[in-house]
Amino acid sequence: MKTNKNCVIRLSRYKNALYRLKSLGFVKIFSDNLADAVGVTATQVRKDFSQFGISGTRKGGYQIDDLINNLNRLLGKDEIHKVVVAGIGNIGTALLNYKGFEKESIKIIAGFDINTVKQNAAGEIPVFPIAEMENFIRQNQIKIGVIAVPDFAAQQIADTMIQAGVKGILNFAPMRLHGPENVVINNVNLVLELENTIYFANAVIKTGVVGQLTASAQPDGV
Amino acid sequence: MKTNKNCVIRLSRYKNALYRLKSLGFVKIFSDNLADAVGVTATQVRKDFSQFGISGTRKGGYQIDDLINNLNRLLGKDEIHKVVVAGIGNIGTALLNYKGFEKESIKIIAGFDINTVKQNAAGEIPVFPIAEMENFIRQNQIKIGVIAVPDFAAQQIADTMIQAGVKGILNFAPMRLHGPENVVINNVNLVLELENTIYFANAVIKTGVVGQLTASAQPDGV
DNA sequence: TAGATTGTTAATCGATTAACAATC
DNA sequence: TAGATTGTTAATCGATTAACAATC
């Protein structure tokens, strides 16, 4: 089964929309409703579900609770994912402060920074010297790391993380990181996103034609 | 000509790689070299250039300076793009502090926040009360806005921006924003990116197979 | 039953890649 | 010239969409 990024992001969005619909009192749902809620076609919804082995009933649609359970299982929400963050600048702090991770089974268990001012071993999420990162990752068997350090330091941090056993890296430094085949590196470049927005906005301004902004990582919503 | 997001992002990456190659002393370049530098195929490079009307010489490759000029023109770097940021929390601050916008012809000219502590009309980039945003956008004819406010406030801020004439919005709030057809809305959801990284890292851990993480917004690099 | 909805197969669409003629 | 490189056309690939049989 070919699973691409867009497909997984759709699963996340279905899940989020379903929580919302559930809170509105829905108990079952049709592919049609869910499609409207997420902004895709009903066929897409059924196709995605079918690909992942989720089925409903021919006339009765899908039970929301079953669906949520299935999606959570597929998305790995049945276990807590421990994450460390390297670089406690603005973006690192934003992540440490974000309150919504718990319900996604994500737990940021430590931050690391080279700057002693940022360090705080007693915080709700402790921040340690970057030199301690490798040992920490090993001892806690961390598999996911976020890199939010300046670009010149990013590759070295990535190497250290990988050496210590990390298998997935979310990188905010504006440079491409290299790693072995069996490590997933997801690069998010905020400047490039802004440049892109400007490009397509200008295209609209100049031509009146709506640009094909088919973002891969659009957020969810109903 | 169909221009999709990935294609424009590749143009940005070519440009960045070319600056790098130029600083290394290169004067001309072959599609092959550039492809290696950016991590795509040589055919892709030539195809992209051909689509945008950029041509080289049959045997001599491309002049780097010409190429950079062409790409900058295509990417709209021949004029300054003024941007405002709503919400001066962690992400908003990260953007206001970022020093690399000038060489991309992007200028953040003001921030807006509801919190008086964040406001500072005398700063290098001034931060005004959010109530003043609409007028400011109108008077300065701003076309691009960044939204970094909490999710419950995001749609209202977007509406205000659009009403005042903004044509492109980069949204960091974790919810889908709605707007008219002729406004480009680029949603970047950091939590979803982390979830995604975890998903594919787990797939690697469990199956040993490398996930198809075809991120749309990978950063540049040589 | 008749109508509605799922699940799947086939068709379409778009983007990437391969092949290769043109030509410097 | 011979070899190398561009620019473009055709082939491939994958994802989305349309069509529709199965069936509740």
Image (cartoon, coloured by chain):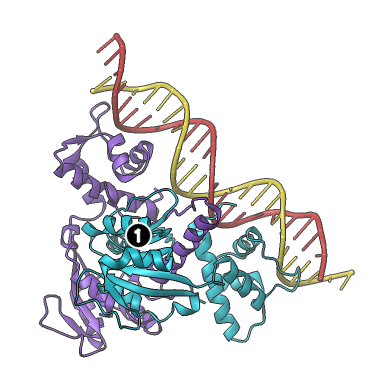
Chain colours: A cyan, B purple, C yellow, D red
Name the residue at 74% across, 74% down: A60
- Report x, y in % for residue A181: 43, 48
Compared to residue A20, the image places residue B36 above or below, namely above
- Report x, y in % for residue B180: 41, 72
Q: How packed is label 1: few (under 14 Cα within 10 Å), some, or many (20 or more)?
A: many
Compared to residue B84, the image places residue A42 above or below, namely above
SS at mark 1? helix
> Which one is in front, A217 or A213?
A217
Q: Residue furthest bottom?
A: B116
Q: Which residue is mark 1?
A: A161
Q: Give the side of residue A1 with respect to residue D5, left or right.
A: right
Q: Quadrant of residue D12?
A: top right
Q: Could you tell me if residue B38 is visible in this image?
A: yes
- Report x, y in % for residue B88: 25, 80
> Which one is in front, A149 or A7?
A149
Amino acid type assigned to the residue bearing label 1 in the image: Met
Q: Could you tell me if residue A39 is visible in this image?
A: no
Q: Give the side of residue A129 with respect to residue B2, left or right.
A: left
Compared to residue A87, the image places residue B72 above or below, namely above
